[in-house]
Image (cartoon, grey):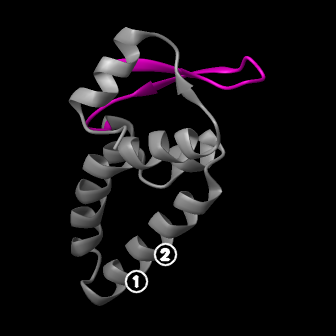
Amino acid sequence: MKAKLKNDAGIIKEVKVGFSWTVFFFSFFVPLIRGDFKWAAIMFLISLLVGYFGYGLTAFIVGIIFSFMYNKLYTKELLSKGYYPLSDADRDIFNSKDYLS
């Protein structure tokens, strides 16, 4: 499911809501490409640290956990930077997934 956010400068961003298949397959490269360097570094460091102690197998579990969390983290980050839902339908999508709390 996708929804749109807009800021006061008129920039519109389309964000996905729910599970992130791109993070599942491409890990920290997704926030890196989106310009979300903070979460790219966090995801990389956690995967590296957990993977080191679990011989690489546990890094896969970290990827699954971030796949469920990342879209919500990214959207909330945009909302804190002044973005807001473009339409009432977008607002309803965010409310149904508890993004606007």
- Residue neighbourhood size for the residue with mark 2, other residues' Cα within 10 Å, grouped as few (<14), some (14–19), many (≥20): few
Q: Amino acid at mark 1?
A: Leu
Compared across the picture, whether 23 is left or right of 1 comes to right
Q: Is any part of residue 6 visible from this angle?
A: yes
| Residue at position x 78%, y 23% in the image | 9
Q: Quadrant of residue 16?
A: top left
Relative to 75, is 3 above or below?
A: above
* Stretch in magenta: 1-20
17 lies left or right of 85 = left
x and y percent of residue 98 in the render? 26, 39
- In percent of width and height, residue 77 lies at 53, 47
Element at label 1 = helix
Instruction: Categorize mark 1 by other alpha carbons within 10 Å: few (<14), some (14-19), many (20+).
Output: some
Q: Is residue 14 magenta?
A: yes
Q: Contact (CB < 8 A) between labels 1 and 2? A: yes
Mark pair 1, 2: CA separation: 6 Å
Residue 31 location (% of width, % of height) = 54, 48
The image shows residue 80, relative to residue 52, as above or below, that is: above
| Residue on which the image places disc 1 | 49
Viewport quadrant of the N terminus: top left
Q: Quadrant of the C terminus?
A: top left
* Residue 1 visible in the picture: no
| Relative image position of residue 48 (x, y in whole percent) | 43, 77
Considering the numbered disc 2 on the image, is that residue within a helix, a strand or a loop?
A: helix
Q: Of the residues shown, which amino acid type is indicated by label 2?
A: Leu
Residue drawn at (73%, 17%) of the image: 10
Residue at the image position 35 percent from the left and 10 percent from the top = 89
Which residue lies under the disc numbered 2?
45
